[in-house]
Image (cartoon, rainbow, N blue to C red):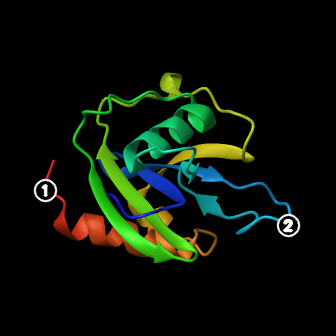
Amino acid sequence: MTEPFHGAKIAILVRNHIVTILRDDIPSIPWPGHWDLPGGGRENNETPAECALRELKEELGLTLDPTRPMWLTQHRSPPSYVWFLAVELPEFNHSMVNFGDEGQEWRLVTLNWFLTNDRTIPHHKKRLQAYLEQRKPI
């Protein structure tokens, strides 16, 4: 994790569901109007987990223990790298969310819906699928 990186995304899995955010529909941003995962740009010298957990708190008001087991993978994304994290959160409930001011809405959707939706950011589907292929049964 010493390589330079510029951002991190985190998949919050709740059994066979995932937490997703509908991006703002602003033409000047990447992937306008698409379903995204919590996360964003790195600040200062954050680790990938610190970056993802800070963004999760800002976007959805969710606070996770940084020692909670998480799956991490690094991906080339010019000008450097991004990290993809996944965490199982079976105790999740809707009352835990305090939706921030980024995005149009959030949803808890089935994994199948997320993976087959034409408006889900494609590289998130691939990274999530890689996690699911090695996921231990719950």
Q: Position of residue 47 (x, y in %)?
A: 40, 46
Q: Residue furthest right?
A: 27
Residue 116: tell me if it is visible: no
Q: Residue at x 32, y 64 (%)?
A: 73
- Left or right: where 7 falls relative to 100: left
- Left or right: where 117 falls relative to 86: right
- The number of discs equals 2
Q: Secondary structure at mark 1?
A: loop
Quarter assignment of residue 60: top right
Quarter of the rendering occupied by the N terminus: bottom left
Name the residue tied to disc 1. 136
Q: Position of residue 9 (x, y in %)?
A: 48, 55
Q: Secondary structure at mark 2?
A: loop
Name the residue tied to disc 2. 28
Cα distance in 3D space between marks 2 and 1: 39 Å
**Toward the viewer: 6 or 128?**
6
Q: Amino acid at mark 2?
A: Ser
Residue 45: tell me if it is visible: yes
Residue 48 is tagged as none
Instruction: Check disc 2: other Cα within 10 Å, few if <14, some if 14-19, many if 20+.
Output: few
Q: Residue at x 55, y 28 (%)?
A: 97
Quarter assignment of residue 91: top left
**Toward the viewer: 114 or 89?**
89
Q: Amino acid at mark 1?
A: Lys
Of badges 2 and 1, the one in the foreground is 2
Q: Position of residue 117 (x, y in %)?
A: 56, 71
